Image: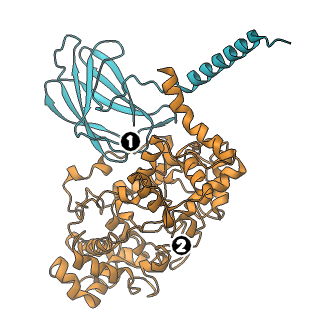
Amino acid sequence: MGFNWRYLVAIIGIVAVALMAFMKMHAEQPPAGDTSASFTFSKPSKQGIYLVAIEPESSSVGIGELHTWIVTVTTPDGKPVTDASIAVSGGMPEHGHGLPTSPQVTKQPGEGRYHVEGVKFNMGGLWELKFAISAPAGDDEAVFNLKL
Amino acid sequence: MIFRRGGIALLPAAAVLLGLLGCKPAPLTEAERKTVASLALSSLPPLPADPSNRYADDPAAAALGAALFFDQRLSRNGDVACGTCHIAGRHFQDDRPLGVGISTTSRRTMPLADAARSPFFFWDGRRDSLWAQALTPLEDAREHGGNRAAYAHSVKANWAEDYERVFGPLPDLSTVPANAGPFGNEAEKAAWAGMDMAQQNTVNRVFANIGKAIAAYERTLVHEKTRFDRFADAVTAGRDPDGDATLSDEEFYGLRLFVGKANCIECHNGPRFTDDHFHNTGIAPAKSLPEDLGREAGVPQVLSDPFNCLGPYSDAAPEACGELRFMNTSGPELRRAYKTPSLRGVADRPPYMHAGQISTLEAVIDHYVRAPASPDGNTEIVPLRISERERAALVAFLKTLSN
């Protein structure tokens, strides 16, 4: 009896496809849109009314430490928005809990910049930081995903 | 790209599979090594200053604090000191489900090593500094049961020289009643109400300094390295752990579960194995205790405490009181949320939970496996799918956090 090499090819093919599917399944990463080592991000708000940029004041964002973030709000064409009120919220969407603290804007040094004090992440994982912006141009929100 | 990322994601699964097949466990992945390093005592940063206590790192204050910590005269019946429940030879806890001072309290006594690093104190975080914490049991009727006027007199009678060396001259207390305080019995409350503001302030200042001295002492109580730390140090340095730095295959498997699929690391993170935060984990109330709302009740107490970071007896500028200023003050997650305890030395000190409700580590793991609904508020934990063997491995790993 001759060995039917077609079966072998078929089996190898099926195994390869199954393996690829398995690997792809396990390669799904959390939404990595804002992930970067520098923690400096910029994006338009949901309805596009503002451009929002955030960066931590200090170079490291350690778990369990209080830190300050600098939020810069401009119009889409780059004009600073200086009279906004900003409410900060967030949490871990995968865990269903909010931020461990209540961060607040404590300083507005001008040019559309706002100091948000009291931000803390108490565990590693995917965090969301939401900035609800209210200014004469309208109410809008920017949500950033951070992977710690 | 997909293959490479997929391959990395599969590594821990492959490692566990090899372990199940009885082979030698695969070495830690790079991500696991980083996590293990983050848990080692060697990664603990230097103790941060306490801006609310300018005597926090004064050795003379710590020496006085040590004496006060064990001074039973600082109690209503002359039998209770801080050291009564925080027993020095027992990791500064008492092995009981509920602490017992003058009478039985409603909470498990917490160990004190590295407690100074917490932003909030007690299981419900109702105080925001070590010194403000130390004052609270002194006036709790179930603990020391005394009052601040009596404590000021006691310090003047017994520790005047040591006190004055640290804090300067003691005030004139000749017109201060022998017993007076805002939380005492009716006569003591009346005596306190009868004192003018300046007199109350004088007593409060001596009382606050008692707390600051005790806090200076407690800041010297630190964790010691255990076998886990020696293992982690070797792994971090890229050495093969040997001698008393080795973990058995079962302990190693438990460590892998702890930082991996058992999710313990989420809250028990960092070198103290705590995120210093408050969580509802569905722990049932202890029988015969009154309703206990946990953090929900702790928040208004720390906000109204005159000895908090923003109060008149704190040495901190308001900017240094970030934990209090940006504290979460409302929300459903505060209901029956309790502080994540450190797991260092955990195997040495049953029973567990805020009122000692669970008597063994095995039963604690069982609680996390079942993840029952919270009797009030919402539990944050979800049922854990782990085998009997994995439960035992977790317990074996936890034992490496003791000496």
Secondary structure of the residue carrying tag 1 is: loop
**A33 relative to B260 in the view: left or right:** left
Q: Nearer the viewer, mark 1 or mark 2?
A: 1
Q: Residues within 10 Å of mark 1 (few under 14, many from 20)?
A: many
Query: Is B245 in front, or is B282?
Result: B245
Q: Which mark is residue B274?
A: none
Whether pointer 1 and pointer 2 mark residues with C-beta atoms closer than 8 Å, the reply is: no
* Residue at 49%, 52% in the rendered image: B268
Which chain is cyan in the picture? A
* Residue at 49%, 76% in the rendered image: B85
Looking at the picture, the colour scheme in use is by chain
Chain under numbered label 2: B
Q: Which mark is residue A121?
A: 1
Secondary structure of the residue carrying tag 2 is: loop
Query: Is B203 in front, or is A40?
Result: A40
Q: Could you tell me the amino acid type at mark 2?
A: Gly
Chain B: drawing colour: orange
Farthest bottom residue in view = B157
Percent across and percent down for residue B398 are: 56, 59
**B79 relative to B17 in the view: left or right:** left
Query: Is residue B266 in view?
Result: yes
Which residue was labeled with disc 2? B99
Structural distance between the alpha carbons of marks 1 and 2: 32 Å
Percent across and percent down for residue A79 are: 16, 15
Query: Is B20 in front, or is A134?
Result: B20
Percent across and percent down for residue B269 are: 45, 50
* Residue at 20%, 88% in the rendered image: B161
Query: Is residue B139 in view?
Result: no
Number of numbered discs: 2
Query: Is B204 in front, or is B166?
Result: B166
Q: Could you tell me the amino acid type at mark 1?
A: Phe
